Image (tube, rainbow, N blue to C red):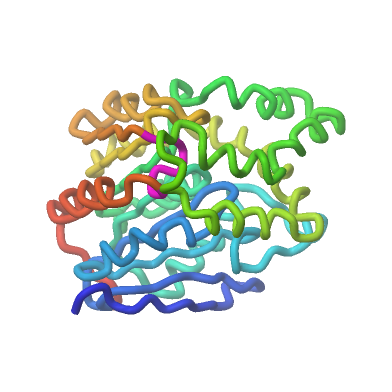
Amino acid sequence: MKNPAVKYLKTKVEDLNVFYREAGPKDAPVILLLHGYPTSSHMYRNLIPMLSDKYHVIAPDLIGFGFSDAPHYKAFNYTFDNLTKYIQGLVDQLELKRFAIQVFDYGAPVGYRLAVANPEKITGIISQNGNAYVEGLSNGWNPIQKYWAEPTEENRNNLRVMTTADATQRQYFTGVSDKTLVAPESYSLDQFFLDRNENVEIQLDLFKDYASNVALYPAFHKYFRESQVPFLAVWGDKDPFFLPPGAEAFKKDLPKAIVKFFDTGHFALETHVNGIGEEILKFLEKLPLNIAFR
C-alpha cells in the first residue's frame, strides 16, 4: 500500500486532549515525530507519507500548540517538563514499547527527556535542527537568555516581537534560497494558533523555561555516551537559531553519529523534504526491529 491514509486523532491524556496524526501499519516499527516552535505536527505533513509505507508514524501536537488543548497560562504550568509529561502519557496510553524519535526545535528537549526516562524504548534518534549543545545556540538567543538571567516584565515584554506574524515568517524564510518552496499555509497556520487569546503568554513562559533545557544538556550527553543510541542529524545549515556546530557536537558523545547538512534554514522540511526523507529512510532501515504495540 502506497502512502497509507493519515488519521487525525485526539485522546485524553490525564486531564487534557492531545491531538496526533497517525499513519502506517500498526504492526510496523514505530517512529514518533516531535515538532517545535511555533508550529505543530502540521510541519511533518509532507514527511509522514514518505515514512508510512514501512513505518507506523505518530506525530502529536504538544500541549499549547496546534490542535492539542492549550489551557490558560495561569491555570497550567508551561514548562518543558510538563510538555514531556503529556507526551510520555501518550506513549504509555498507546503502549509504545520500542520506537525511534525524530525531534525538531522544541521537540528536541521533549524527545531527549523522553529518551533519558525510557532508554530501553528508544531504537534511534533523528534530530532535524534539534539542539543539545551550547555550540549550537546562535546570537539569536541573546534576548531570551537575558530573560533567563533577569526575568523582569521589561525583558518578558521585549520578547513579544518574536511571536508576531513577521517574526514567524522570518523563521521560515531565513536561509532559504527559493522562498517559493515554502508553503504559505505553514507559517499562516502557526500564526493562527499564536494569535489565540493570550497564547503569547504561553510562549513567553516557555521562552523563560527553555533555560531548563540548557541546564539538562549534561544529562542528555550522559545518556548519549552511555546508550550510544543510533543517531542521525539532518540540519539546515543556515538556521538562524541552531548553528551547524551544534549538529557536529553530537559526535563528541556519539562518535558514530551521522551528520548531514542541507542548504536551507530552520524549517528544512519545507524546502528539502525529499532529501531529508531519503536520509531518514536509510537510517531507519539500519535500526533494530521494534514492536509497535503489545
Q: How many marks?
A: 0
Q: Position of residue 180 (x, y in %)?
A: 45, 46
* Relative depth, front residue between 118 and 156: 156
Task: Inspect this view and state whether residue 84 appears.
Answer: no
For residue 204, above or below residue 51: above
**In the depicted structure, whether residue 39 falls above or below residue 134:** below
| Left or right: 248 as drawn, with respect to 167 | left
Q: Is residue 242 inside the magenta stretch?
A: no
Return the residue nearer the eye: 270 or 34: 270
Residue at the spot x=74%, y=28% of the render? 147
Asked if residue 74 lies left or right of residue 105, the reply is right
x 48%, y 61%: residue: 41
Which residue: 41% across, 58% down? 44
For the N terminus, the quadrant is bottom left
- Residue at (46, 41) in percent of width and height: 179
Left or right? Give the position of 180 relative to 1. Answer: right
| Position of the C terminus by quadrant | bottom left
Q: Quadrant of residue 236?
A: top left
Q: Is residue 269 magenta?
A: yes
| Relative image position of residue 210 (x, y in whole percent) | 61, 37
Who is closer to the viewer here, 253 or 107? Answer: 107
Residue range in magenta is 264-270
Is any part of residue 56 visible from this angle? yes
Residue 50: image x %, image y %?
26, 62
